Amino acid sequence: MTEPFIDAKHRVLRRTVRAFCEQELRPIAAEIDQEARFPWEVAEQMGRLGYFGIQAPPELGGAGLDTVSYAIIIEEVSRVSAAIGLCLSVHNSVALFPLLAFGSAEQHQRWVPSLARGERIGAFCLTEPNAGSDASGINATALPDGDHWVVNANKVFVTNGGIADICLIFARTDPAAGRKGISVIVAERGIPGFVVGDLEDLCGMRANPVSSIRLYDSRVPRDHLLGKTGQGLAIGLAALDTGRIGIAAQALGIAQAALDEGVRYAQQRQQFGVPLARHQAIQMMIADMATQVDAARMMVYRAAWTKDQGAVVSRTAAQAKLFASEAACTVTDLAVQIHGGYGYSKAYAVERYYRDARVTRIYEGTSEVHRMVIAREVLG
Amino acid sequence: MAIHSIVCIKSVVRAAPDGVGRRTPENSELNPFDRPALEAALRIKAAEGGTLTVLSMGPPVGVEALAEAQAMGADRTILISDAALAGSDTLVTARVLAAAIARIGACDLIFFGTRSADSDTGQVGPQTAAVLALPFVGGVKQIERRDGIWEIRRLMDDWEELWQVDVPLALTIHPKAFKPRSIALPGIAGAYAQPAIETWGIRELTLAADQVGLSGSPTRVTRMQKVVRKRVCRMLEGEPQQQVEALIAHLGRMGMMST
């Protein structure tokens, strides 16, 4: 019997990524969460092995894999460390993907190879203090001045912010044009006026250096415009369609990890003279968890597979992200419940999974925004 | 000097259920004891140049283990798969591998893992060397070529042996001697972009059906069953000193500690 949407290549890939994560990431996953430390020692290895250029073509230094592969990689990495899964998802899908999809050949040569090899890290800078779900409400500006753009932006909750070298900045190039005046400018860290803010002290995903990024009168060359002027929101939405598959895969990985730990603990822990797994109350939880994980996996892989067929993916990706992130919260909650008091302790991994799961319902589109997207598709 | 190496690998059953397990892609994987052998051969190729051919005998599911070998850097991969081979014991496996190695042609080094994670006999490497009448060194931890002579080191208990051997030569690689590399993702894409795994049956090896499989094998597995060891918990009584003495005496009686 074969698993739907998965072929032999994907199975080999899954085994490969799982073995790498168990060997290199598992031993430090709890520690990097507690210390809120980004593990460069593992990230550099991942860079050499192609994890930062999953779908980039080999001629630009990438691994040349498909979207199903991308989902499997994010799932497997997130199963061990969701914070590193997040780093890869954002880098690959909302930073590298739009550069590949909308960049010129010259821009590809300039940015893609170093990003694909993990030598430089990408970030997606859309959210502002007063513009989240309503992306069209941003205040950042990039105004033409000679052969440069003068960029002023206050971007918050930037995933990879503390380590990002190449940032996609959403800014108004024509402030009078409303939604149609938003463009994407690629800003490189280190240019004058580019400031990385303090790292956020977050509930979960702590090994990812999420920060604000601000630009004060930063002068960016005119050829750092991605796509055309006014194309910003379209680029953002296209990037988020891909990003949603990544975040859905991440939520799936967290949920699978929580299920694994829940099952293991239920089989080991004895209460009333028998393992927890012999109690029907626990069996009901395990059954629900396994069903949610299974359904989430089918939806995530289907969305990825749909994208690989070249079809429009907005609805399937939104449904996968909505379902998988809600499932991750339910499943991690039940895993904590199975662990009882120990599940509330940092001594057990489910405590971290519980914290990490929560944000999957918020970032790259909240569950509510996804319901809006889905409803619009259903109702026409 | 270009070195031509062959690595023999196996796709093993990860967790066998009671009885004879059916192999599926989900319960099969590249034998972990073969990874250090692949690594050793890849390092020789990197240092000396040459080619690396990877050979596996088994059901069709073995193509996934060969794809991994290809993703790691193998130049050529061959699966020997034939319904007639079902039930082959280690001797027949060695004869089949030897026939395949002979068909591949001239080579310098033939690598094996020390054993397989599922049947665990440790026989196929040395038996293949015997069938081919080649020199053999087992449990190798270091391979060097000095002034055209191959120097092979292996660990035996507390002794290190140094062998000087002529090629062609067969070796099993100590499981801890070469840390296998992580597979790079572009390698996986590459292995499937141009699927190049060759499949040979017994006809290509000019073997007859009655020479192989169950009918050709002098040994056969008649039954498999899970062995469950019952664990007994015994509480020691008394003061710590007495408990320690009782524990030492008990371990001594079990032959696990000299008293």
Image (tube, grey):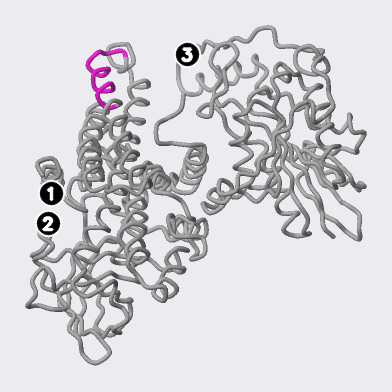
- Residues behind callouts 3 and 1 on a single chain: no
Residue B182 location (% of width, % of height): 56, 49
Assess whether residue A288 is covered by the magenta stretch.
yes
Mark linked to residue A369: 1
Mark 3 lies on a secondary structure that is loop
Q: Is residue A186 above or below residue B213?
A: below
Image mark for residue B233: 3
Q: Tell me: residue A88, above or below residue A191.
A: above
Q: Quadrant of residue A102?
A: bottom left
Q: Position of residue B199 (x, y in %)?
A: 70, 34
Three-letter amino acid code at disc 1?
Answer: Val
Q: Which residues are magenta?
A: A278-289
Precedes in sequence: disc 1 or disc 2: 2
Instruction: State whether the magenta stretch is mostly helix, strand or loop.
Output: helix
Marker count (numbered): 3
In the rendered structure, the answer to whether residue A96 lies left or right of residue B213 reads left
